[in-house]
Image: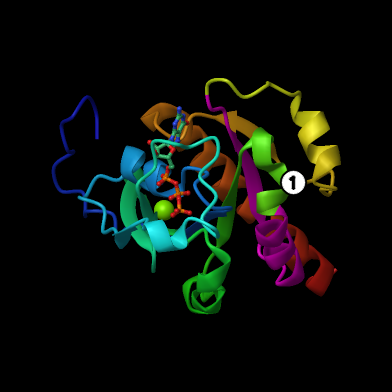
Amino acid sequence: MIFGRTERGKAPVEPVTLKILVAGGFGVGKTTLVGAVSEIKPLRTEELLTEAGRPVDDTSGVEGKHTTTVAMDFGRITLREDLVLYLFGTPGQDRFWFLWDELATGALGAVVLADTRRLEDCFAAVDYFERRSIPFVVGVNCFEGASRYPVEDVRQALDLDAAVPVVLCDARGRESVKEVLIEVVQHAMAYAAGRRHTVTG
Ligand SMILES: Nc1nc2c(ncn2[C@@H]2O[C@H](COP(=O)(O)OP(=O)(O)OP(=O)(O)O)[C@@H](O)[C@H]2O)c(=O)[nH]1
Ligand SMILES: [Mg+2]
C-alpha cells in the first residue's frame, strides 16, 4: 500500500490476530482504554453500581463512576495491515475473579493498568500473570490529581522484574493507548523468542 493505493495484483495479506487482555483493579480505566482504541463499537457488559454495592465498590478517586464491568469488554484494533489485536477487558472487582481463566485462555500478553493512588489494587493482576507466565506490561493511567511518579518507582513498588515494561499512559487517548499496545506486542514477542531460545538452546 502506497499512500492509500493498493498495489495491483498483490494478494491481500491475511492478518495475524493476537489476543491481549486488559486487566487491573476496580475503576482503573480498563473499559475506557478498550473504548478509546477499538475500531469496532466495543462490546461492553456494564451494570450500574448500586447503593447495595457501596460498601464493597470503592469509587474513591473515580467518583464520577456509575457503572462497572461484570463480564468483559471486547474491542479490536488493527495495529498494522497484517496485525490485528483483539482486546479483552477484564472485570475489576474481586467477585468476578472466576471469569479470568476463561478470558486468559490463548492470550499472547496483557496490559495491567495501574492508578498510582491505589497501586495495591493491581497486585492481584500482576500476580496472576506472573504465575501463569503470561507476558505483561504495566500501564500507569495518569489521572488528573494523582501524583506523578517515575516509572522506576512504580516498578519498585510493584516489585516487578526488570524486563517488565512500565509505561505512562492516558486510557482515554487513542495514540497513548496504541503505544501501550505496541509495547505489549513487542514485549510478548521478545518473551516468546527468549523462551524458544531457552528450549532449543
Ligand atoms: N480523569 C480520568 N478519568 C478516567 C481515565 N480513565 C478512566 N477514567 C474515568 O474513570 C472511571 C473508570 O473508568 P472505567 O473505564 O469504567 O474503569 P474500569 O477499570 O473498566 O472499571 P471496572 O470495570 O468497574 O473495574 C470512568 O468514569 C472514566 O471516565 C483517565 O485517564 N483520566
Ligand atoms: Mg470496566
Count residues near mark 1 (Cα–Cα under 10 Å), then give few for <14, some for 14-19, many for 20+. some
Query: Which residue is at the front of the view, 174 or 66?
Result: 66
List the residue tagged with mark 1. Answer: 164
Quadrant assignment for the N terminus: top left
| Magenta stretch holds residue 135 | yes
Segment tinted magenta in the rendering:
123-143
Residue 89 locus on image (x, y percent): 44, 57
Task: Say which residue appears at 82% left-offset and 31% top-offset.
Answer: 153
Q: Quadrant of residue 53?
A: bottom left
Instruction: State which quadrant residue 110 falls in.
Output: bottom right
Residue 164, position as x, y percentages in the image: 74, 46
Q: Is residue 78 above or below residue 199?
A: above
Q: Residue at x 39, y 32 (%)?
A: 172
Horizontal placement of 165 versus 34: left or right? right
83 part of magenta stretch? no
For residue 24, side relative to residue 147 (left or right): left
Please tell me whether mark 1 sits on a helix, a strand or a loop: loop
**Location of residue 38 (image quadrant):** top left
Can you see residue 80?
no
For image coordinates 67% across by 41% down, the residue present is 118
Q: Position of residue 188 (x, y in %)?
A: 62, 55
Picture residue at 21% right of the left edge, 50% below the top: 40
Q: Amino acid at mark 1?
A: Val
